[in-house]
Amino acid sequence: MPTYLYFGENEFFLTRTIKQLKTHTLDQQWADFNYTEYPPESKETIPQALSDIMTPPVGSGGRLVHLPNSTLLGVCSKEILLQLESILPKIPSTNTLLITNTHKPDARNKSVKLLLEYAQVQEFPLIPQWQTQALIQQARTLADEVGVTLTTDAYKVLIDYTGNHTRLIFTELEKLKTYALGKTVNGDMVKELVSESAANSLQLANAIRLGNIAQALEFGDRLINCNEPALKITATLTTTFRTWLTVKQMIITGCQDDNAITQLADVKNPKRLYYIRQEVANCCVNKLKNGLKILLELELMLKSGVDEKLALQTQIIKLCS
């Protein structure tokens, strides 16, 4: 099938699959002649790309035409739609049309409907940070690929430090393999070698929710040491507390409509509601309301020039109490 539609927020897997397709399609000696990438900024991009995809490759190997983040996935003119409808069934077997996008295309668009008829579609979703077990499973798969063995606690520490940054996870696993020299990597090795990313705001929120002051302060320090802006940390905490409060209040009022809850709580991924219900099961509404007040105080403190680390530590202790 000469047409491919790849989309998703997981840049690591998306980029890697594109490279694999290029390797499979192109003869490296003729790649400069037969690979064309058309940026979405130009108005002439699509007509040029559609003309190019019907052109036989030069020399040996195939031709690959790549349209990243293409406007072809949006609302297209009648002329483009007619041209697309005519070309898609006739693309030479030697040629490959690749369309990629970071977000899921809107299947209601006529151009997308056409592409879905002819294209081989593959999605590369980014696992949410709150799906810890899914992230650990992904890390296990990548570790098998890299050829390094980790203990169960090592995987937990790795995900604590890297969050859902797939490329970072892969890079750190390669580093651990070099260090381990065939031995099993434990949690202490990960703590010693892996660079922490600024992916711990949700972990900080959960530590606060559980009233674990020591762990919450540790996560707060990690974030500051990773140069994560305190105002950004505060914004994440505020959003999390607001979501918890909204869901908790709707549960208390007896609302059973998950769609209504996700919409009012602004939960982008409906599947997350199951986890939020568990998180707020033992939460007190008044404590969540008070938490939002404390976070507002924190925001005002930070905007007035108070030392970031001191302000964050002070308010974390209040939030945990």
Image (cartoon, rainbow, N blue to C red):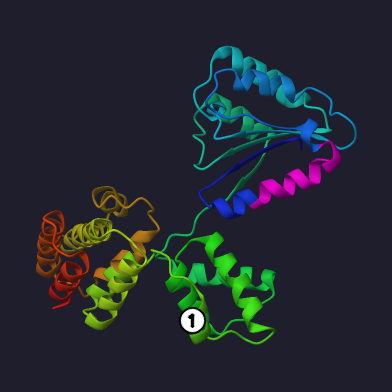
Left or right? Give the position of 268 relative to 320.
right
Check the picture and name the quadrant holding the C terminus: bottom left
- Name the image quarter holding residue 308: bottom left
Residue ID for mark 1 = 192
- Residue that protrudes farthest toward the top in the picture: 79
Could you say which is closer to the camera, residue 312 or residue 51? 312
Magenta segment, which residues? 16-30
Q: Residue at x 63, y 15 (%)?
A: 82
| Residue 123 horizontal/vertical position (percent) | 58, 48
For the residue marked with disc 1, what is the amino acid?
Answer: Glu
Check the picture and name the quadrant holding the N terminus: top right
Could you say which is closer to the camera, residue 130 or residue 230? 230
Could you say which is closer to the camera, residue 279 or residue 142? 142
Residue 151, compared with residue 46, is above or below; it is: below
Q: Residue at x 90, y 31 (%)?
A: 59
Residue 19 belongs to magenta span: yes
Which secondary structure class fits the magenta region best? helix
The residue carrying pointer 1 sits among few (fewer than 14), some (14 to 19) or many (20 or more) residues within 10 Å by Cα, namely few
